[in-house]
Image: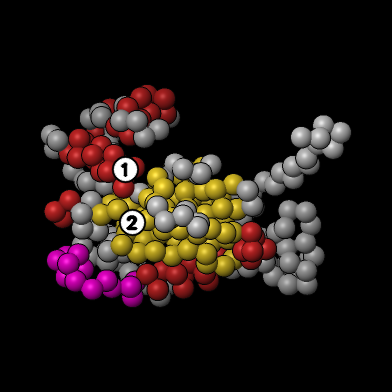
Amino acid sequence: MNLDHPRIIDVQNHSIFVATWNVAGRSPTSNLSLEDWLHASPPADIYVLGFQEIVPLNAGNVLGAEDNGPAKKWLALIRKTLNNLPGTSGSNNGGEDGHRRPGGHSRYCLVASKQMVGVFLTIWVRSELRDHVKNMKVSCVGRGLMGYLGNKGSISVSMSLHQTTFCFICSHLTSGQKEGDELRRNADVMEILKKTRFPRVNMPNLVSLFTDVSRVIWLGDLNYRIALTYRSAKALVEMQNWRALLENDQACFNFLI
């Protein structure tokens, strides 16, 4: 290294909006608005949106051909909403934050969309960033019926933005609060971590989830509970005692956070 000519590092800050929604098998209606759900001020640079149960989890959908009709409706609605959010349009020329395009409107473009039965992960970025998103890879892990079907499980997307590599994991874990259900959720997590693999460029072997990944963001319907009675949990919410709630969150003491 030539210390007389140190390498200049260009640091860029980008905001990421992450949200998840279990839609219980319902397709979006014609009058459904996502503006309140997707509102961020200022609008984010990247939107990562996860869904669970975008189709009813019946035998036909779990065992038969994938129904991507609802996914197309969600994509159309998301595209419409993102491109009409306050702050995403205008005629001002862009500044250093890249929120405007010269002489036109800011727009978001879809860079990733993957469905596994009812689990659906979609990623949108500002059009100005599209050319900087590279090395897109997808990995699916089924944890549903018979331990491998896709009514439960995860979709993971790995991508690089500039020099930072992200992995977004959208999952739907085992439900229920009977004895043993929590352990089954833990087993889901362990299998997802174990089986999520991405192909490496110019290498035949798959690499594990955490290989060459700078940031991992996990979202979804994890189905972990607050280990308190309803009355106790409600009282803590009313007191805004978030620390006590966090201490009793199954996800926390089961190593997710």
Residue bounds of the magenta highlight: 58-70
Residue at 53% across, 51% down: 17
Q: Position of residue 173 (x, y in %)?
A: 27, 47
Residue at 52% across, 67% down: 110
**Closer to the camera in the image, 76 or 159:** 159
Residue furthest right in the image = 4
**Closer to the camera in the image, 133 or 46:** 133
Q: Would residue 61 be found to the left or right of residue 256 on screen?
A: left
Residue type highlighted by circle 1: Lys
Residue under label 1: 194
Residue at 59% across, 59% down: 133
Residue under label 2: 140
Q: Position of residue 205 (x, y in %)?
A: 40, 52
Q: Are marks 1 and 2 in contact (CB under 8 Å)?
A: no
Dot 1: element: helix
Circle 1 Cα neighbour tier, 10 Å, few/some/many (<14 / 14–19 / ≥20): few
